[in-house]
Amino acid sequence: MHIRGSLRTAGLSGAAVYLTQCVIALALLLPAAQAQDEASVQVSDALGRLVRITSTQRVVTLGSDITEIVFALGAEDRIVAVDRGSRFPEDATSKDNVGYRRRLSTEGLLSLNPDLILAAEDIGPPETVDVLKQIEIPLVLVPKHDSGEGIRRKIELVAAALSLETEGRKLAEEVLEKFDSATRLADMIPQAKRKKVVFFHGVERLTAAGADTAADAIIRYAGGINPMDAFQGYKAASEEKLIELAPDVILMMSNGRGGPTPDEVFSNRALSVTPAAQTRSLIVLDGAYMIGFGPRTADAVRDLTKALYGVELKSDGE
């Protein structure tokens, strides 16, 4: 009202007054619009999609490694929900749970009213992912690569999405230094003493990890040999094949109930014929810890190396 009165006093017509008011209103709104644009970030995800993010106050994390990275960056208060596999750190279990990351429900995710979804690139099912790509809520798919460089890329992308680039660079440097230190332990193990290790998902269906799997990578980083690496991905292993491969050690994920136990594993007819059965050599590790390739992977490499070779090795500079 004050503006209108002063403009009329200056002798402007009604149309001119209206136009001038619009210009003034636009000028008043422009700083706020610019501030919002400056607060937004744009990142390139695993598919090469440019994703614009304007708010990160309500974040859903899908993937144990993604959740661990957000916690390690100190942004856990922004997380409103996680997937079923995100059980570390313990505080992650207090968040809402959206279930298995490969069987997601679009409705369930949208009901959380998230500002941002940070997800491992292997989330599913495909039809849910297709819908998530089309909606206005930013979806950042984080690339999966089972290496130290892959962990660094995960951390830096998640940090950029959360506008925590400085924290991300620091965390990536610390994690990569530990990873390189842990993987150097394998160089100290003579080739002749390296053990053949086969990873199985479970006892009932003996599906073993071949090349291009996280399990294959962790075995190699810990100084083991994966005799299944002639195959890509996961492949069923018959009794005849296991006799041929002759693994020295069986590696498995914990079932969360104290098992599997050596009795359960080596009572399986196919596994009972392996050299591992003769020495009852079974190593059981938490799945996310062992094959998550996140901030704790260096510790997992060390633990597996120690379990395989029975000594606490030290790398150069420690």
Image (cartoon, helix red, strand yellow):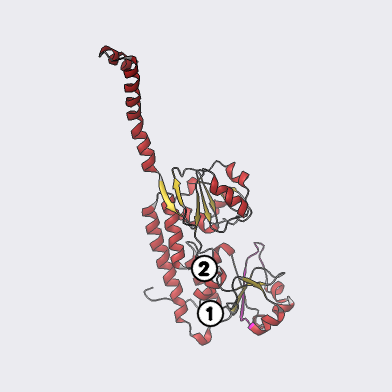
Cβ atoms at labels 1 and 2 below 8 Å apart: no
**Residue at point 40% right, 51% down?**
164
- Residue identified by numbered label 1: 309
Vertical comparison of 135 with 234: above or below: above
Instruction: Report the side of 52 relative to 263 (left or right).
Output: left
- List the single residue furthest toward the bottom: 192
Which of the two residues, 24 or 174, is positioned nearer the viewer here? 24
Residue 102 percent location from the top left of the image: 61, 56
Q: Amino acid at mark 1?
A: Tyr
Vertical comparison of 298 with 45: above or below: below
Which of the two residues, 171 or 161, is positioned nearer the viewer here? 161
Q: Amino acid at mark 2?
A: Ala
What secondary structure is marked by label 2? helix
Quadrant in the picture for the N terminus: top left
**Residue at point 48% right, 49% down?**
76
Instruction: Report the side of 43 relative to 241 (left or right).
Output: left
Residue 303 percent location from the top left of the image: 52, 71
What secondary structure is marked by label 1? helix
Vertical comparison of 238 with 121: above or below: below
Q: Quadrant of residue 22?
A: top left
**Residue at point 59% right, 64% down?**
287
Instruction: Report the side of 8 relative to 281 (left or right).
Output: left
The dot on residue 194 is none
The dot on residue 300 is 2
**Residues shaded magenta:** 245-259
